[in-house]
Image (spheres, rainbow, N blue to C red):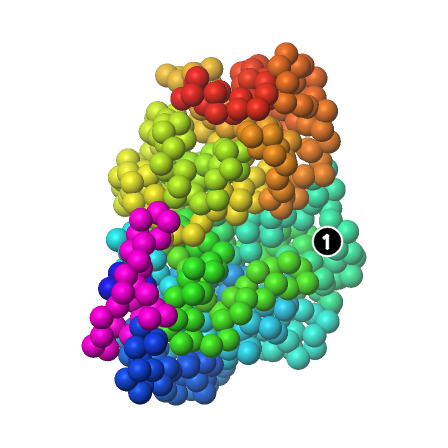
Amino acid sequence: MNKLFDSNLRNQEFVLKRHKFHDGRAKSDISLAFLSVKRFGMEEKKMRLDEQGLQDRQAWEAAGYELPGFNREQMIARTKEVPFWVHFGAGNIFKAFLANVVQRLLNDGTLDRGLVAAEGFDYEIVEKMNRPHDDYNILVTLKADGNVEKTVIGSIAESLMLDFDNQDASLRLKEIFRKDSLQMCTFTITEKGYSLVDGTGSYLPAVEADFKGGPDAPSSYMGKVAALLYTRYQAGQKPIAMVSTDNCSHNGDKLYAAISTFAKKWVENGRAEEGFLRYVDDREKVTYPWTMIDKITPRPDPSVEKILLEDGVEGLEPVITSRNTYVAPFVNAEECEYLVVEDAFPNGRPALEKGGVIFTDRETVDKVEKMKVCTCLNPLHTALAVYGCLLGYQKISEEMQDEELVKLVQRIGYTEGLPVVVDPGILAPREFIDTVLTVRVPNPFMPDTPQRIATDTSQKLAIRFGETVKAYQRSPELTVQSLEMIPLVFAGWLRYLMAVDDAGNAFTLSPDPLLDTVCPYVKGLALKPDQDVEAHVAEVLKMKQIFGVDLYEAGLAEKVCGYLQELTAGVGAVRSTLQKYV
């Protein structure tokens, strides 16, 4: 039987008819298998993902699921008594990575407590997904060789809404933040979650209101987090590590900048004691470690849902919340994972290194983070996302069959990126890129899409490419003018903003907070030759907040405009431009 579609039927002795997918892969005829089951008088098992449904461990294990190997009732009670870890942002990478690390350590006895999950952006995730499933979820690991690992994750002890309008939730979180036992808070809220300003640099209305209102009832995400820290300060200035695990450069500094801004504003406005500002600045009390995290966790995919349904799992229907968040009781992810953390925990920490987390110093984290975010993975992903959307691709893995796109990302990584990467010593950059381009991104079983990765591109370009441009500016041996592929990605993004693919068909742009700011500049562009593209996009090219540099000052504006003129020359111009330059 094809490993990808292995199910609880694999232990039954009957022959399965096989057929072919459109791409030639064999798949077991599950429907015939179920007919065979019924023919032999065996009833199909139905499994529900909640505390009651998981009492039938035999059914789950027979279907190939790894279940929690600890007493969950005791774990939950112990966690509520002496919580040690709160995580903000109950999304896919948290469920696929951090929650699984904790589960492994619970299974081997290293830990006796689990996680507290807090959701501060979309409360419906807690109401409509976490709680109906008793905080369980299924991790489906999709390996490049076609193997599937299915794990029921039960390491979340409780999930809460980070909502100061919800008295029960806010009182519970404040109770947790007063506990001596609390050692760390982690975050996966995306880079924009730490931002206090809009595209013009002005404070967001909710942030401005929270500055004035103080820590009693904030509504902005960082305002709510700062308010919980203020609770911990008032409880005796207890130490804690505030750990961002989002994919952005120097993520700990972004978190610190937001928290310290709230502390300053509250003190200035008489809404908090002066000692609170000293508390959040005191590294003996509060730290903001840098981290590098890497694990591809795409949106839960229908093909993976089908595998689980065929196993007999019930209640897998995804939920699309009123805030347009797509959540499901399962998450699909690749096998590879990396988490490198600056070892700065003033209240101690669990032995997460036993679960594969790498602890090191800030300088090494910085090197690893730059290696990955600025060179070895994220820039390659963004390039594939932009051009994948323009060329009509629906899966990232399929782009790795495209000769021009493969050459594009190879040159971005090996030719333009590696010269400015310092080997961090714990992960080898060239080997990292090799794995990305030969194993991870081409994995045909990973249902990742260029449309997903193109989300928030305006927030990513400065880090994923701008840092390399700055490194070339600083280098005595390298010149910015030698860069060719990075400017081609900048031009490709401007072409992408036209929301018309290379065949001339309109498509929907992925969500991005700056679309309303940048799209008007490209509105006058058309698919025709000899137009003055610079007249339209000149102001965008000067936006350091997007590219990390002013492209005119960096000497790249002319090259970007030249590429953009060719990319907009007509239908098929994107393909011909790639063929010409890569």
Residue 332 visible in the shown view: yes
In the shown orientation, is residue 580 left or right of residue 70? right
Q: Measuring 44% from the left and 65% from the top, which residue is drawn there?
A: 305
Residues in magenta? Answer: 6-32
- Front residue of 300 and 573: 573
- Density class for disc 1 (Cα within 10 Å; few <14, some 14-19, many ≥20) is many
User: To which quarter of the image does residue 32 belong?
Assistant: bottom left
Q: Quadrant of the N terminus?
A: bottom left
The percent coordinates of residue 158 (x first, y second) are: 52, 77
Q: Is residue 15 magenta?
A: yes
The percent coordinates of residue 54 (x first, y second) are: 40, 83
Q: Measuring 45% from the left and 49% from the top, which residue is drawn there?
A: 448
Q: Measuring 61% from the left and 34% from the top, which residue is drawn there?
A: 505
Residue 554 visible in the shown view: no
- Front residue of 302 and 15: 15
The percent coordinates of residue 383 (x first, y second) are: 47, 34
In the shown orientation, is residue 312 left or right of residue 257? left
Q: On the image, numbered disc 1 is attached to which residue?
A: 207
In the shown orientation, is residue 213 left or right of residue 395? right
The percent coordinates of residue 160 (x first, y second) are: 58, 73
